[in-house]
Image (tube, grey):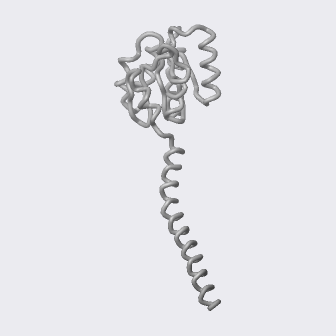
Amino acid sequence: MKKEDKNVIIEQIAATIKEYGHFYLVDMTAMNAASTSALRRACNKSEIKLLVVKNTLLRKALETLEEDFSPLFDTLKGSTSIMFSNVANVPAKLIKEVAKDGIPGLKAAYAEESFYVGADQLDALISIKSKNEVIADVIALLQSPAKNVISALQSGGDTIHGVLKTLGER
């Protein structure tokens, strides 16, 4: 491969990393063609971009970016695929759902501006809440006191109305 071609690929990988907020490094070496195709279809349904890359080109792309991605460099051995997503926990859930006997295996991930290295981090990645989930939790917490006040006012109004009606009948 010519140096110019490599530079174009490095730039494309770097641009994709900038475009998506989160990415996972996955080992799909032991997957056969049918399971790889099934994984690709599942990624498309979940709005995950899946790329198979050369480790050296990925490393050079990561080095061109402003952030320090050096914690991920030790995982760039063997076959590496990258799962890009705008939601931090979606690829982790997909890997857990599809994985059979640890295949595909999680090498590392960059999610919510943190590094997760090793397959043992999969459960931690699954538990990360997306932006929409956090917003929903905050709204639910904010609505709870307001609902209690409204409920108390409504029940109090019924009580006062009942007392006034009773007094009026006497």
Q: Position of residue 31 (x, y in %)?
A: 55, 10
Image side of residue 169 versus residue 3, left or right: right
Q: Position of residue 28 (x, y in %)?
A: 51, 13
Quadrant hosting residue 106: top left
From where the camera sits, is residue 169 visible?
yes
Q: Position of residue 54 (x, y in %)?
A: 48, 13
Q: Position of residue 105 (x, y in %)?
A: 47, 17
Residue at 59% across, 76% down? 158
The extreme front residue here reads 170
The C terminus lies in quadrant: bottom right
Residue 145 sits above or below residue 158 on the image: above
Image side of residue 25 versus residue 47, left or right: left
Residue 27 sits above or below residue 117 on the image: above
Q: Between 61 and 77, which is closer to the camera in this rendering?
A: 77
Q: Between 3 and 41, which is closer to the camera in this rendering?
A: 41
Q: Between 65 and 51, which is closer to the camera in this rendering?
A: 51
- For the image shown, how many numbered marks are present on the structure? 0
Residue 168 sits above or below residue 114 on the image: below
Residue at 40% across, 24% down? 63
Residue 31 sits above or below residue 165 on the image: above
Residue at 48% across, 63% down? 145
Residue at 37% across, 20% down? 73
Q: Between 159 and 33, which is closer to the camera in this rendering?
A: 159
Quadrant hosting residue 154: bottom right
From where the camera sits, is residue 4 visible?
no
